[in-house]
Image: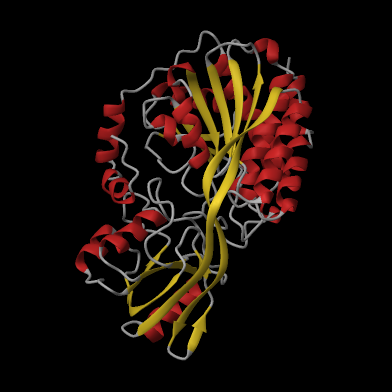
């Protein structure tokens, strides 16, 4: 029966929920808006036929922005604080390290200086360098402050958290500036003293994971996941309202196909992803990893039409995604490399099979993500519906009793991180688990 395809392609459930999420406003981890988004998601999952829809609370380090500034010469340049920056003021000579590659930090004397680095890496570089990695290279080198410069044009300062699990508040003040402001700072003030000023409130807070089930009541489960929190400066439409909308739309389609599921599908929408994968880390610490058949983590879907699956070296996941793409004659790219920066990772790092599902955009880096421009108008309902169809079929395949998915030894994961030059950065960030 293919009736479910037509129903999914004409469904408004996911898009309506996406509108609900973006209209809440601030969904920063630990905020009232994040709680409301979690409650709305719980209720929406219940409404489409999932059972046992409920919230689970957990404690987090809350953070609320106040003001920020970069004072250079007799000017004050536009900036936004990076979440979990400490409050404070630091003055030092401005050093522009360009892309902020590890070797750039190694060559430079940054002790007591204000370091600026871009949000991208050059085309020739073989891996992405996360914002936190650049920040902690600056900390390790004794910098007084860190300035994170966007590579996307449009006067859009980037956000994104710093801090670590052991020390949630970062060590030095840090701000994001637009590409244009960064270029101005470099041209006019490199080598001069500048001051970075951040005012923010750190406090105890509560976040929430949303749980619901579909299919038979088996101990083993396929986890269908996303995160509901977003940065406070925008609507969080692409990151990650769309991912949560996909989970809802897939759940609706699965509710109509429950008799095809041999394995329970557990919908799990995390809180506090944007501040260090806190919600997924909380769940991974409590969940029996042997009872997880596979994870389908949706973070970055809907921004383009073609799905991209990071399969983390699990050949069976690669085969399953390609098979669904072939069945629907729809492109579905697979990437076997490791990606340690979304909610699949607290499980995948220990050998649990997991996807990070994104979409191809043709852009470098996050695009509009983590900026004021992450708004609903950047997304299309067609993409959401098409991708929900493909992902529904994928989850049904993964839940099939005849589908076998081999796990990986954590030592193999660690070795692959070394081979892909990811280990050193994870160690400086404090994310190395082995």
Locate residue 247: give its quadrant.
top right
Locate residue 190: give its quadrant.
bottom left
Q: Which image quarter is the N terminus in?
A: top right
For residue 260, above or below residue 58: above
For residue 174, above or below residue 396: below
Question: Which residue lies most toward the bottom here?
Answer: 74
For residue 241, above or below residue 142: above
**Pick the front one: 78 or 33:** 33
Q: Is residue 333 visible?
A: no
Q: Is residue 256 left or right of residue 356?
A: right
Q: How is the image coloured?
A: secondary structure
Q: Is residue 42 visible?
A: yes
Query: Could you tell me which residue is drawn at 70 percent across and 16 percent down?
Result: 257
Q: Is residue 93 left or right of residue 401?
A: left
Q: Position of residue 75 (x, y in %)?
A: 49, 87
Q: Position of residue 420 (x, y in %)?
A: 29, 42
Query: Could you tell me which residue is drawn at 54 percent across and 21 percent down?
Result: 222
**Pick the front one: 51 or 150:** 51
Q: Which image quarter is the C terminus in?
A: top left
Q: Position of residue 126 (x, y in %)?
A: 31, 49
Q: Position of residue 297 (x, y in %)?
A: 53, 34
Q: How many marks?
A: 0
For residue 54, above or below residue 74: above
């Amino acid at each position: 029966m293919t009736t479910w395809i037509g129903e999914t392609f004409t469904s408004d459930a996911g898009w309506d929920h996406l509108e609900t999420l973006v209209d809440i406003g601030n969904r920063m981890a630990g905020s009232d808006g994040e709680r409301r988004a979690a409650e709305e998601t719980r209720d929406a999952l219940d409404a489409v036929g999932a059972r046992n829809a409920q919230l689970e609370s957990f404690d987090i380090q809350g953070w609320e922005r106040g003001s920020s500034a970069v004072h250079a010469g007799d000017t004050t340049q536009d900036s936004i604080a990076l979440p979990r920056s400490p409050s404070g003021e630091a003055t030092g000579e401005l050093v522009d390290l360009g892309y902020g590659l590890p070797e750039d930090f190694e060559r430079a004397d940054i002790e007591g200086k204000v370091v600026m680095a871009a949000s991208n890496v050059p085309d020739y570089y073989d891996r992405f360098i996360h914002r936190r990695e650049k920040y902690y290279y600056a900390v390790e080198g004794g910098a007084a402050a860190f300035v994170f410069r966007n590579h996307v044009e449009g006067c859009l300062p980037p956000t994104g958290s710093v801090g670590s699990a052991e020390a949630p508040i970062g060590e030095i003040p840090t701000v994001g500036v637009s590409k244009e402001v960064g270029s101005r700072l470099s041209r006019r003030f490199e080598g001069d003293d500048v001051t970075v000023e951040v005012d923010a409130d750190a406090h105890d807070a509560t976040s929430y994971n949303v749980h619901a089930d579909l299919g038979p009541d088996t101990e083993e489960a396929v986890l269908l996941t996303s995160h509901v929190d977003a940065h406070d400066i925008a609507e969080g439409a692409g990151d990650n309202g769309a991912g949560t909308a996909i989970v809802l739309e897939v759940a609706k389609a699965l509710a109509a196909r429950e008799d095809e599921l041999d394995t329970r599908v557990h919908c799990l929408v995390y809180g506090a992803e944007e501040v260090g994968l806190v919600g997924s880390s909380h769940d991974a610490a409590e969940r029996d990893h042997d009872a997880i058949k596979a994870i389908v983590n949706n973070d970055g879907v809907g921004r383009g039409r073609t799905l991209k699956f990071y399969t983390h070296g699990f050949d069976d996941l690669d085969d399953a995604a390609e098979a669904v793409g072939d069945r629907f004659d729809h492109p579905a790219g697979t990437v076997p490399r490791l990606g340690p920066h979304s909610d699949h990772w607290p499980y995948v790092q220990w050998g649990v099979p997991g996807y990070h599902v994104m979409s191809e955009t043709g852009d470098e880096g996050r695009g509009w993500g983590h900026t004021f421009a992450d708004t609903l108008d950047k997304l299309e309902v067609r993409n959401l519906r098409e991708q929900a169809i493909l992902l529904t079929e994928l989850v049904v395949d993964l839940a099939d009793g005849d589908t076998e998915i081999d796990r990986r030894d954590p030592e193999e994961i660690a070795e692959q991180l070394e081979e892909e030059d990811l280990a050193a950065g994870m160690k400086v960030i404090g994310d190395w688990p082995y």
